[in-house]
């Protein structure tokens, strides 16, 4: 049943005595603004219907039906100043170009061992002239010790080939990783994972962080993990998910 208004939402949904209608919105560009919750409305994520809060926020992005992941505006919080934004590094930035330049070496090291775990009939050839890996997303925040922490998602589209048991295979390698950098130094690898998949990225997830919380020197990020036909809201520390809630799927 969809609540008619805020007063009809069960108190247990809030985790406190009642709704907080005056909130802070942390935008993906780092800007902050005040928003007010005005009511509730149904919405759909993938194949599931959900109920969400409506606010007086006016976005500049058109949200088209059946487009996933949804182009989120940011993250709202009930207590101002608790969360800090996670910056999405623009494609033209020096850091984006620097991480992109690392990718050929990263994929050369990780790609072949990753595909060797796949049955031979579904394993692409990694020889010959191949397209360059592509950096799909790069995010940055700071760590308590003054270093910068980067999260990246990169893909390598490989040539299609016919498989006796699977038809035409369109393989792709995904590498996700975490890098740290001190002032005046290069990138240091904190963690990297390679995943053999296809153009739909089945079996892989893409991180979309919205904010970070510093607790006792630990860096907790809040955002979504998006899979082939699903997404979840997560609180995580690097690749370790600490809390998650289903956001919809098929």
Image (spheres, grey):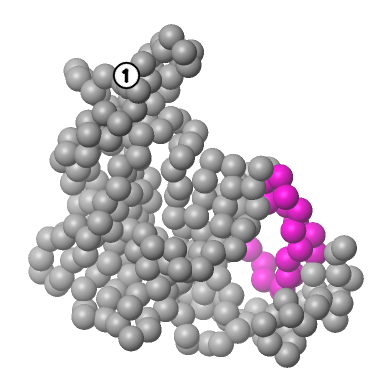
Regarding residue 96, the answer to whether it shows in the image is no
- Magenta stretch? 41-64
Quadrant of the rendered structure where residue 113 is? top left
Quadrant of the rendered structure where residue 60 is? bottom right
Q: Is residue 123 left or right of residue 170?
A: left
- Closer-to-camera residue (120/142): 120
Residue at 39% over, 63% down: 240
The C terminus sits in image quarter: top right
Quadrant of the rendered structure where residue 125 is? top left
Regarding residue 183, the answer to whether it shows in the image is yes
Residue at 19% over, 18% down: 128
Residue 94 place in picture, x, y as percent: 23, 56
Task: Determine which residue is flagged by label 1.
Answer: 120
Tell me: residue 80, above or below residue 95: below
Q: Residue 4 magenta-drawn?
A: no
Secondary structure of the residue carrying tag 1 is helix
Residue at 41% over, 12% down: 163
């Amino acid at each position: 049943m969809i609540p008619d208004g805020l007063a009809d939402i069960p108190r247990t949904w809030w985790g406190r005595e009642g709704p907080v209608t005056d909130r802070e919105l942390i935008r993906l560009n780092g800007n902050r603004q005040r928003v007010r919750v005005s009511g509730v409305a149904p919405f759909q994520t993938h194949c599931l219907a959900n109920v969400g809060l409506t606010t007086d926020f006016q976005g500049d992005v058109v949200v088209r039906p059946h487009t996933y992941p949804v182009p989120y505006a940011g993250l709202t919080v009930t207590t101002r100043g608790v969360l800090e934004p996670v910056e999405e590094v623009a494609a033209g930035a020096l850091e984006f170009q620097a991480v992109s330049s690392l990718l050929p070496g990263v994929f050369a090291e990780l790609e072949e061992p990753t595909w060797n775990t796949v049955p031979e009939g579904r394993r692409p050839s990694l020889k010959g002239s191949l397209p360059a890996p592509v950096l799909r997303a790069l995010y940055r925040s700071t760590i308590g010790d003054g270093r910068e922490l980067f999260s990246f998602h990169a893909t390598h589209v490989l040539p299609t080939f016919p498989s006796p048991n699977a038809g035409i295979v369109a393989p792709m390698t995904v590498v996700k990783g975490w890098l740290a950098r001190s002032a005046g130094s290069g990138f240091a690898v904190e963690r990297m994972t390679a995943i053999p998949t296809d153009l739909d990225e089945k079996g892989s997830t893409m991180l979309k962080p919205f904010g970070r919380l510093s607790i006792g020197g630990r860096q907790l990020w809040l955002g979504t993990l998006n899979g082939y036909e699903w997404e979840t809201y997560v609180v995580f520390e690097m690749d370790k998910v600490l809390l998650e809630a289903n956001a919809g799927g098929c």
